[in-house]
Amino acid sequence: MSALELRTTDPEGTRLAAQVIAGVLRPGDLLVLDGPLGAGKTTFTQGLGAGLDVRGPVASPTFVIARVHPSLSGGPALVHVDAYRLGGSADLEDLDLEADLDDAVTVVEWGRDRVEHLTSSHLLVELERPDQVDDPDLPEEPRTLRLTPAGPRWDEGAVTDLARALDAAGLPTEQIEQEN
């Protein structure tokens, strides 16, 4: 399986990457965000919200579990879910995400191995931060974003479009092979 990997140096870079990714998304897309606490999942989703031109502010839905941000320009809404506090599949089913899946872009923080079954395709976004930085007094927050497409929606053409959009924004990607 092939994935795209890119690096950002600060929160604005992570937001920009997500904003660019939003430009290639379409209604029905599911993004599954994975990474440790503080890796930038909500920061990434804020960039998606800006790119999709949705009503905000986009904030972590940790305590409300899910928020719907309607489009301000006639595009798809952003459904932002935080699965961190969800106990199992019954809790997930109670959210009734399937109702919005076809018409919205759905982003699920902490969704890995929990929501992929909701649709035939998804984009796994893994956010990694370094364990330590060279100079802890600098405000930089470098991140590595690994984008792993799955399913027919993310065919070779769609992945190429995604890589080109990121390159055009000054966010070059590296294609990496991953084991299944």
Image (spheres, rainbow, N blue to C red):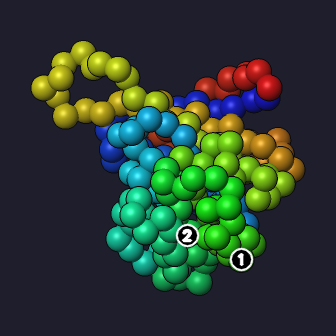
User: Going from the N terminus, do you reach mark 2 or mark 1 first?
Assistant: 2
In the picture, residue 99 is in which quadrant? Answer: bottom right
Q: Quadrant of residue 164?
A: top right
Q: Quadrant of residue 13?
A: top left
| Residue 122 relative to residue 168: left or right | right
Tell me the kind of residue under disc 1: Ala
At mark 1, the secondary structure is helix
For image coordinates 69% across by 56% down, the residue present is 89
Q: Is residue 145 visible?
A: yes
Q: Position of residue 97 (x, y in %)?
A: 67, 69
Residue 78, numbered circle: 2
Q: Answer with left or right where residue 96 lies relative to residue 43.
A: right
Residue drawn 24% across the image and 15% down it: 134
31 relative to 14, above or below? below
Q: Amino acid at mark 2?
A: Leu
Q: Quadrant of the N terminus?
A: top right
**101, above or below 85, in the image:** below
Q: Is residue 163 visible?
A: no
Residue 27 numbered mark, or none: none
As drawn, the residue found furthest toward the left would be 137
Residue at point 59%, 84% (across, down):
74
Residue behind mark 1: 99
Seen from the viewer's position, the closer of residues 164 and 3 is: 3
Q: Nearer the viewer, residue 150 or 83?
A: 83
> Between residues 137 and 175, which one lies in front from this camera angle?
137
Residue situated furthest right in the rendering:
152
